[in-house]
Image (cartoon, helix red, strand yellow):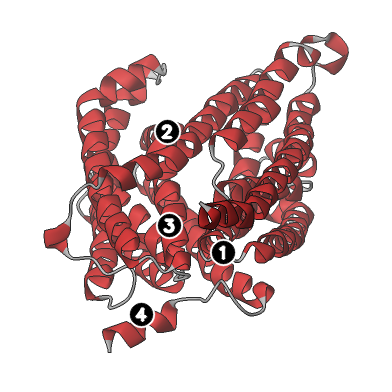
């Protein structure tokens, strides 16, 4: 019965029509990501409305730091997803079993490491980041409690990545929705009734994260399929760990580098004053919804490509890429266009100031409207990672996006004629185009190399039989 239930959630990525299965994979994942954003927004809304501006600043100021500290380990979960997809596609049950158990234990170790770093180093790190003195104590308290929930957060992320490897994106959505509802209810209870301020928001987050992690573990323990987890078999297989790190570490470092480059961009935005900064921040929050909608097809592309590579279905790799690009362009243009068209209404949710709304609309016009370019770039990265290349897309992204933006800000932006907020915003779409084209060149080279490798296999087999 358990095995039949597990199979009903899985997707056969290695045969049949690609597009319907891509959509079946990506849509629940898209909904999960958007729900996560909505629940995160609920944290900020509750603390802002019922605890005050200082508490709002304390919670909001931690967002970039949390992303910076967790991106590396989120990258490792991508490595686990790719490796599990490959073994599942190849039908290698033992490799799949080792990957599942190594990944879950790795998630616990990663989470415990982050918990120690966050609990012991919160105040020091916030001081290095020049957190305002009037919110430093509240921000440090929030960060310490938040990071105590990191083991649960990592378990959920790795568990969900393993479920995605077999095409199951629905159950993680159900678990995330359950945990999110609990988070909102506990936010209101701890902040309004118990008056725990930022500590209440952090405690609610930790509890909801723990619920989502327990649901994923329960699912995997009871699963009768490829992602079955037996707690007594938790251990690290060095070969599997090495494979996860080879793919996951470059992905994680890429996330860190993007976060650091965005800090520099943000400082340039801040130089235009609080009105522009507020409008940019509001627009950025709206952009996040467009980004996660497109990112679902990046993750679908990774899983589909990895499975078909493992199964030896090489002819399906290019059609998977083309259909993923089609989906991401449609979603990016549709959502980006809607966000820009309805920007006056959407931005009013963040501010009533006409100047802030105008500043936010300016960013959406320059960054969100062409956001499909970013999705196209990410899908190319997904294909490269899916066929086994992880360092290459990291280096290309580093040069094409991160370094380009830094050079753009330090050269063209410094010229009086181009010292405008629009010049800052243009660095995004231009860097996306440059990086996308570079990734296309890398992909064509990688596919030619794969083709030569496949053509050489019969010759090697023939020589072996002759000897």
Helix, strand or loop status at disc 4? helix
Of pointers 3 and 2, the one earlier in the residue sequence: 3
Question: In front here: 73 or 347?
Answer: 73
Name the one closer to the observer, 457 or 139.
457
The tag earlier along the polypeptide, 1 or 4, is 4
Q: Which residue is mark 1?
A: 312
Q: Residue at 43% across / 57% down in the picture?
A: 39
Pointer 2: residues within 10 angstroms few (<14), some, or many (20+)? many
Residue at image x 56%, y 59%? Answer: 309
Residue drawn at x 37%, y 15% as measured from the top left: 128
**Residue occupying the far right of the picture:** 417
Q: Nearer the viewer, mark 1 or mark 4?
A: 1
Give the spatial CA distance, label 3 vs label 4. 28 Å
Find out whether the residues at labels 1 and 4 contact each other: C-beta distance under 8 Å: no
The local secondary structure at tag 2 comes to: helix
For marks 1 and 3, the one nearer the N-term is 3
Residue 293: image tag: none
Asked if labels 2 and 3 touch by Cβ distance under 8 angstroms, the answer is no
According to the image, label 2 marks what residue?
57
Query: Measured from the top left, where is residue 258 in percent x and y?
Result: 56, 31
Answer with the quarter of the image where residue 131 lies.
top left
Q: Is residue 422 left or right of residue 353?
A: right
Q: Residues within 10 Å of mark 3 (few under 14, many from 20)?
A: many
Disc ID at residue 39: 3
């Amino acid at each position: 019965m358990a095995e039949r239930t597990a199979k009903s959630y899985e997707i056969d990525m290695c045969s049949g029509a690609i597009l319907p299965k891509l959509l079946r994979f990506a849509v629940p994942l898209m909904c999960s990501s958007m729900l996560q954003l909505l629940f995160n927004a609920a944290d900020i809304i509750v603390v802002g409305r019922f605890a005050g501006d200082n508490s709002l600043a304390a919670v909001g100021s931690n967002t970039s730091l949390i992303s910076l500290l967790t991106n590396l380990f989120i990258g490792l979960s991508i490595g686990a997803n790719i490796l599990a997809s490959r073994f599942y596609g190849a039908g290698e049950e033992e490799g799949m079993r080792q990957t599942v158990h190594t990944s879950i234990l790795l998630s616990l170790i990663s989470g415990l490491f982050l918990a120690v770093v966050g609990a012991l180093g919160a105040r020091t790190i916030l001081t290095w980041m020049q957190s305002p003195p009037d919110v430093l104590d509240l921000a440090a308290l929030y960060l310490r409690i938040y990071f105590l929930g990191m083991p649960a957060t990592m378990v959920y992320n790795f568990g969900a990545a393993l479920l995605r490897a077999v095409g199951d994106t629905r159950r993680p959505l159900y678990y995330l929705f359950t945990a999110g509802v609990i988070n909102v209810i506990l936010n209101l209870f701890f902040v309004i009734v118990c008056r725990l301020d930022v500590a209440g928001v952090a405690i609610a987050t930790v509890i909801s994260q723990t619920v989502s992690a327990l649901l994923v573990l329960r699912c995997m323990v009871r699963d009768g399929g490829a992602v079955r987890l037996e707690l007594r078999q938790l251990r690290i297989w060095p070969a599997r760990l090495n494979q996860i790190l080879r793919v996951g570490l470059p992905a994680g470092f890429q996330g860190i580098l993007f976060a650091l480059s965005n800090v520099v961009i943000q400082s340039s935005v801040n130089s235009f004053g609080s009105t522009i900064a507020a409008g940019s921040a509001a627009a950025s929050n709206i952009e996040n919804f467009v980004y996660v909608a497109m990112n679902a097809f990046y993750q679908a592309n990774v899983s589909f490509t990895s499975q078909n590579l493992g199964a030896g279905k090489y002819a399906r790799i290019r059609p998977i890429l083309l259909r993923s690009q089609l989906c991401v362009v449609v979603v990016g243009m549709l959502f980006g266009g809607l966000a820009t068209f309805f920007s006056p209404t959407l931005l009013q949710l963040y501010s009533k100031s006409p100047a802030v709304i105008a500043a936010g609309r300016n960013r959406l016009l320059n960054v969100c409207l062409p956001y499909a370019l970013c999705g196209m770039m990410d899908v190319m990265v997904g294909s490269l990672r899916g066929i086994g290349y992880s360092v290459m897309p990291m280096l290309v992204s580093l040069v094409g996006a991160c370094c380009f933006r830094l050079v753009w800000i330090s050269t063209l932006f410094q010229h009086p004629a181009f010292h405008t907020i629009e010049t800052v915003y243009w660095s995004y779409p231009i860097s996306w185009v440059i990086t996308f084209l570079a990734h296309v060149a890398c992909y064509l080279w990688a596919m030619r190399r794969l083709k030569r490798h496949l053509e050489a296999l019969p010759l090697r087999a023939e020589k072996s039989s002759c000897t």
